[in-house]
Amino acid sequence: MGKDDLDDFSDEEVPDTKEWIMEIVKTWVPAIFAVLFIRSAIAEPFRIPSGSMVPTLEIGDHILVTKYTYGFRIPLTRIPIGQLQSPKRGDVIVFVYPGSDLDVSPYHFRDTKFTADKMNDVDKKLSYWVDLPLMAFTAIDYVKRVVAIPGDRIKVVDNIVYINGKSQKKTFQ
């Protein structure tokens, strides 16, 4: 490469800083929005933090959870669109630990029955409404198996679960 070849490059314009920033924004903002949309509306990865699901799910296992199985929510929020369906007995679900998205102490509902109407009296953290993987919007997520559905009566005696008076065998799917 001779000196004349290098002179050809010096005639090119140096990109303006403003144009360069706009180019970065035009490239990255749609990509980041697409990832956040997919994560909040379609599927989200989770890591199993504890042994409560062993042997079905081991500590440290990674799972991909579909977000639309029980109904749709407005993307990037936790606000439902229409009526959400209830999970069925045996389903593995991910849910926000009750109260971790509320601005109250963990003992706020200790001596009272936790009902939906009590939610109106409580300040909600931003994570109650917004579903983003950023520290300001995080809540404690639990991964558990549905043991009973509304209306069932549950009793545990000597580590045996009874639902509606019938003992349940430990079966793992």
Image (cartoon, rainbow, N blue to C red):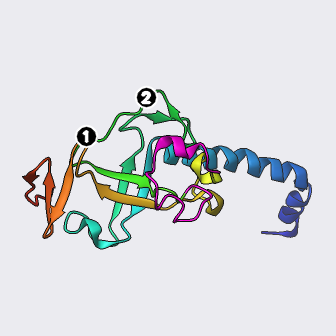
Q: Nearer the viewer, residue 172 or 4?
A: 172
Main SS of residues in magenta: loop
**Residue found 58% across the figure and 49% down from its top:** 128
Expressed as whole percent of the image width and height from the top left, the position of residue 67 reads 42, 43
Residue receiving disc 1? 151
Expressed as whole percent of the image width and height from the top left, the position of residue 122 reads 61, 50
Is residue 12 at least partly visible in the picture? no
**Tag 1: Cα neighbours inside 10 Å, few (<14), some, or many (≥20)?**
few
Give left or right: position of 19 versus 91. right
Q: Nearer the viewer, mark 1 or mark 2?
A: 1
Is residue 99 at least partly visible in the picture? yes
The span from disc 1 to disc 2 (Cα, nearest Å) is 19 Å
Question: As displayed, is residue 8 above or below residue 151?
Answer: below
Tell me which amino acid carries mark 2: Gln
**Residue farthest along the top direction in this orientation:** 82
Sequence-first disc among 1 and 2? 2
Tell me which amino acid carries mark 1: Gly
Residue receiving disc 2? 83
Q: Is residue 117 magenta?
A: yes
Secondary structure category for the residue under label 1: loop
Q: Nearer the viewer, residue 107 or 41?
A: 107
Secondary structure category for the residue under label 2: loop
**Picture quarter containing residue 6?**
bottom right
Instruction: Give the extent of the magenta segment.
Output: 101-123
Give left or right: position of 118 versus 156. right
Find residue 24 and name its label.
Answer: none
Q: Is residue 65 magenta?
A: no
Expressed as whole percent of the image width and height from the top left, the position of residue 5 reads 83, 62
Q: Nearer the viewer, residue 42 or 21?
A: 42
Please state the total of marks drawn on the protein image.
2
**Residue found 62% across the figure and 45% down from its top:** 33
